[in-house]
Image: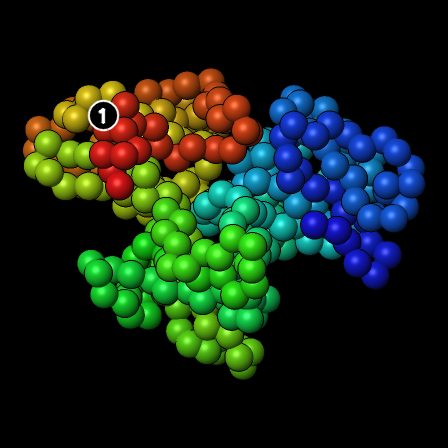
Amino acid sequence: MTGGDGERHAAFPCPAVDDVAEPHREDLALEHLISCLRPPADVLQAVRDAQPDILSAYPGVLSRLADALEDDGRPAPPLRFIVSASEVLDPDTRRRVSERFGAPVFELYASFEFVLIASQCRETGLLHVCDDNVVVEIVRDGQPARPGERGEIVLTGLHARAMPFVRYRLGDLVTRGPDPCPCGAPFSTIASVQGRVLDYLTLPDGRLLHPYEIVTRLLPRKPDTWIRRDCIVQDRVDRIVLQIVPTRAPEADELVDVRKTLIPVFGHGVELTVELVADIEPDPSSKRRVSRSRVTTARDRR
């Protein structure tokens, strides 16, 4: 992405790309690339040095930058707004990043195959589908999902002449929104993006549980800020570990409350362990994984 109208834009589109130092590149593109594989404190300093109007990054990177900003103690660099893309942006991460940086956070939904699929409406918070670029179908149990229902997204590109994608399963779960958007724009909408189909957990009773079902139950407890970050790890079909990076030492009743909330979700025969950890490392790409399952392969889940 590049900033328009003379804006300077700091972005983290590729973890393999380090700081772009060539002045002519910045002058032409008004874009400054920073490697998200660097330590968060170094990335934050690079953002300060770039003095961007707009900051674009993975949600996991933005979350770590928000933590680094809190530890830094200095005022946040002034930003017009922040763009989140390439991962699920959960409400808690959006709130924390917006509060720490003092700027609104907007979400983009895109892929390598289709480029931009949808972008967030400033009025409603829904995602406007790029209907002139891609045909979006949301399928639930083999049938079109209704507004408010979650299903797997199926896409057909309208401009890929060399390599057409027709009814392509991207592997994401999304919730269908109203058509058109209530803001008055003539676009169909996606209410929210939940994440990858491959993130499902396989349970002893045969159910496939998406981590979104867990996250939505934890989120109401996050505004008290004791849960900074979490990840669900399944090492056996009957054992799940919930890793939590806390902001402080939780009280015993807070840990009990987490267990009482989640055990009914998993059902009988599943051992749940809550593990407090200092940090949860991102994937090599610097993306954040909400779950890691060692029970089934990607092919098994598809």
- The answer to whether one can see residue 205 in this image is yes
Left-right relation of 131 to 230? right
x and y percentages locating residue 286 in the rendered image:
55, 29
Instruction: Name the residue rendered at 66%, 23% in the picture.
Output: 38
The quadrant of the picture occupied by the C terminus is top left
**Kind of residue at badge 1:** Val
Of 170 and 23, the residue lying toward us: 170
x and y percentages locating residue 152 in the rendered image:
32, 54
Say if 247 sits above or below 55 in the image.
above
Instruction: Name the residue rendered at 37%, 64% in the picture.
Output: 137
Say if 46 sits above or below 85 in the image.
above
**Quadrant of the rendered structure where residue 48 is?**
top right
Q: Secondary structure at mark 1?
A: loop
Of 137 and 2, the residue lying toward us: 137
Instruction: Name the residue rendered at 79%, 58% in the picture.
Output: 4
Reading the image, the residue beneath label 1 is: 295
Left-right relation of 229 to 293? right
Instruction: Name the residue rendered at 82%, 42% in the picture.
Output: 51
**Quadrant of the rendered structure where residue 41 is?**
top right
x and y percentages locating residue 92 in the rendered image:
47, 45
Left-right relation of 235 to 103? left
x and y percentages locating residue 56 in the rendered image:
66, 45
Callout 1 crowding tier (Cα within 10 Å): few <14, some 14–19, many ≥20? some
Of 1 and 71, the residue lying toward us: 1
Tell how many labels.
Answer: 1
- The answer to whether one can see residue 192 in this image is no
**Quadrant of the rendered structure where residue 58 is?**
top right
Q: Residue furthest front?
A: 162
